[in-house]
Image (cartoon, grey):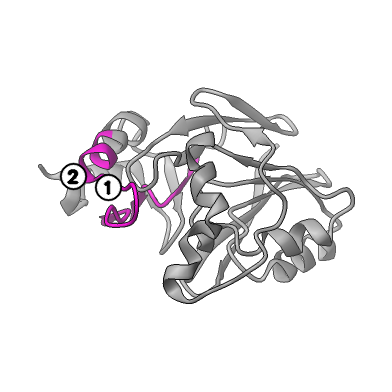
Amino acid sequence: MHLEIVQFTLGPAQTNSYLITAVGSKEAVSIDPSWDGHLILDAAKQRGWRITNIWLTHAHFDHFGGAAAVADGSSPPPPVALHPDDYWLWRENGGAAAYGLTFDPGPEPTIELTHGQKLYLDRHEFEVRHAPGHTPGHIMFYCPGEKLMFCGDVIFQMSIGRTDLPRGDHRTLIDSIYREVLSLPDETRLLPGHGPETTVGQEREFNPFLQE
């Protein structure tokens, strides 16, 4: 039973958001409902899916700007999962004020993500991998059965996440990538928070930020 993945690119930062379900299932998870939550909700309803959880890789505003609309349109409202090291950032609306933006943050996170934690969507197991550096509480969702990882803003095709934002740290991010990304098989698909998908092998060989 494979995963079905619907990708959106939404909002002022053109952030990737993912709606996922197990093929044949009616329960879905919204990963990083970045913006325009009604579009995510509509896509789920068109397919007969019910969004049962919202999983956040981290708490920058462009990764949960659509959470309120997703929650408001779902019955019951899905709980929000976030690493506690990013709660401070969530409470500051993800830094949106620095860009002159305001938005409804939606439901407060109630599921504390921890490194090594296992999450389940139908029969699919996801491993939570803590990868700080872009933000202190940044995590990634790794699905070994499907050989893919939702990696947020840790690593992109030929690039890495910013570390010039509050509490970012370049050395910490590089260490996280070596430990939590490059330790995976080369064929592992990486579905990032911005830009096209890539693979561990491609980034291991060609990413200029990892040729230190």
* Crowd tier of the residue under label 1, counting other residues whose Cα lies within 10 Å: few below 14, some 14–19, many 20 or above: many
**Label 1: which secondary element:** helix
Three-letter amino acid code at the position of disc 1 = Glu
Image quadrant holding the N terminus, namely: top right
Residue 152 horizontal/vertical position (percent): 46, 50
Q: Badge 2: how crowded within 10 Å, few (<14), some, or many (20+)?
A: some
Q: Which mark is residue 210?
A: 2
Pinpoint residue 122: horizontal percent, then vertical percent. Answer: 75, 33
Q: Which mark is residue 29?
A: none
Q: Which residue is mark 1?
A: 203
Instruction: Using the image as rendered, state which of residue 79 and residue 116 is in the foreground.
Output: 79
Q: Which residues are magenta?
A: 148-175
Residue 144 in view in this figure: no
Mark 2–mark 1 Cα distance, whole angstroms, equals: 8 Å
Q: Amino acid at mark 2?
A: Leu
Label 2 with label 1: CB-CB less than 8 Å: yes
Q: Is residue 169 part of the magenta span, yes or no? A: yes
| Rendered residue at 54%/43% (across/down) | 87
39 is higher (above) or lower (below) than 60: below
- With 184 as the anchor, is 149 left or right in this view? right
Question: Is-magenta flag for residue 136?
Answer: no
Identify the residue at image location x=62%, y=58%.
33
